[in-house]
Amino acid sequence: MRSLLPALCILFAASAMADYPDKPIKIIVPFAAGAGTDAVARFTAQKLEEQLKQPVIVENRVGASGAIGTQFVASAAPDGYTLLFVASPFTTVAAATPTVANYDPVKQFTPIALIAAGPLVWIANAQAPFASMREMIAFAQANPGKLAYGSAGAGGVNHLALELFKLKTGTDILHVPYKGIAPATTDLLGGSIALLTGTIPAVLPHIKGGKARALAVTGDKRSSLMPDVPTMKEAGANGTEVYNYWGLVAPAGTPSAIVNRLNAEVQKFLSHKDVQERLSNDGVDLTPGGPERLATFIAHDYNGWKKLVADAKLKVE
């Protein structure tokens, strides 16, 4: 008589997925509380909790430019109860510092949904000897090594945006890594460094206040929050497009029924007007779609940054 165990296991798994979720879900944010990514993660958790009728708890596990929290989720049970809220460092850190990151963003995670994506903006100290991106490129080419650029840390999206820029424009600009973009911004406003890239909402008050100059946005179109600021292509730096993004992933092996349920819930709240207004104020575009959209985005981003690291012969500690 054939064993009934396989059939019973299938029925048990199907029943468990039908009841999902029947306990609290935890979303790991691998960055500090209060940062931009954390704020969007908590907003996402709130919406999911309202729709799923189960607590959705945000837990910050920081360290190693996001690698600590990411590794934690990679090794978690693939049951839909431990998720990771990802942003650009998910792919940039893995590409630039693979031994430190110690995770593969493509192989060790199951994409759930891409939530939003948007450009960064290049800004300069208000006293810098250039007023546009074209002027900055000319100054950097004529003065190799004399401009300093601050980032949120080695291997992050701000850092690799600079390395991509340097490779495409043939410039030599000093990279100064900070422990977060906030101290880098403080030094830029004080004149210790000349340049940085940041999210538009974070730097817009300094631009409006006259303490910083916007040189260009890193997307392929202008931002509605600063329509007078050109794109990198318009400003003479073609091929340097960079996007910041937010999404939700689970450990590899998470059942497709759970992934599809979570994706459906994300699509539901992305259709709400208050969510659209909230994310529009962050200068990003909503990116509705199935799990495969995030899978494609992650693979393309990761492979692109790995190519940059190889082409620029980067050695990031």
Image (spheres, grey):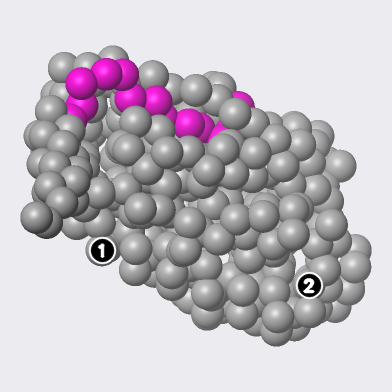
Where is the N terminus found, in terms of image quarters?
Answer: bottom left
Q: Residue at x 35, y 53 (%)?
A: 253
Upstream in sequence: badge 1 or badge 2: 1
Please tell me in which quadrant of the rendered image residue 30 appears.
Answer: top right
How far is disc 1 from disc 2 in space, using C-alphas?
A: 30 Å
Residue drawn at x 90%, y 63% is 146
150 and 58: which is toward the camera: 58
Q: Circle 1 — which element?
A: helix
Q: Which of the 4 image quadrants contains residue 9? A: top left
> Mark 1 against mark 2, which lies toward the viewer?
1
In the depicted structure, whether residue 179 falls above or below residue 305: above
Give, as a three-letter code, the residue at label 1. Glu
Which mark is drawn over residue 119? none
Q: Determine which residue is flagged by label 2.
A: 314
The image shows residue 190 at horizontal and vertical percentages of 81, 34
Confirm whether residue 205 shows in the render: no
Q: For the residue marked with disc 2, what is the amino acid? A: Leu
Q: Which residues are magenta?
A: 20-32
> Is residue 127 a member of the stretch shown in magenta?
no
Q: Quadrant of the C terminus?
A: bottom right
Viewer can see residue 60? yes
Residue 96: percent from the left, percent from the top? 69, 64
Residue pointed to by mark 1 = 292
Place of residue 142 in the rendered image (x, y in percent of width and height, measured from the top left): 85, 78
Report if residue 22 lies within the magenta region: yes
Side of 315 relative to 248 (left or right) = right
Q: Is residue 118 above or below residue 133?
A: above
Residue drawn at x 52%, y 67% is 302
Q: Secondary structure at mark 2?
A: loop
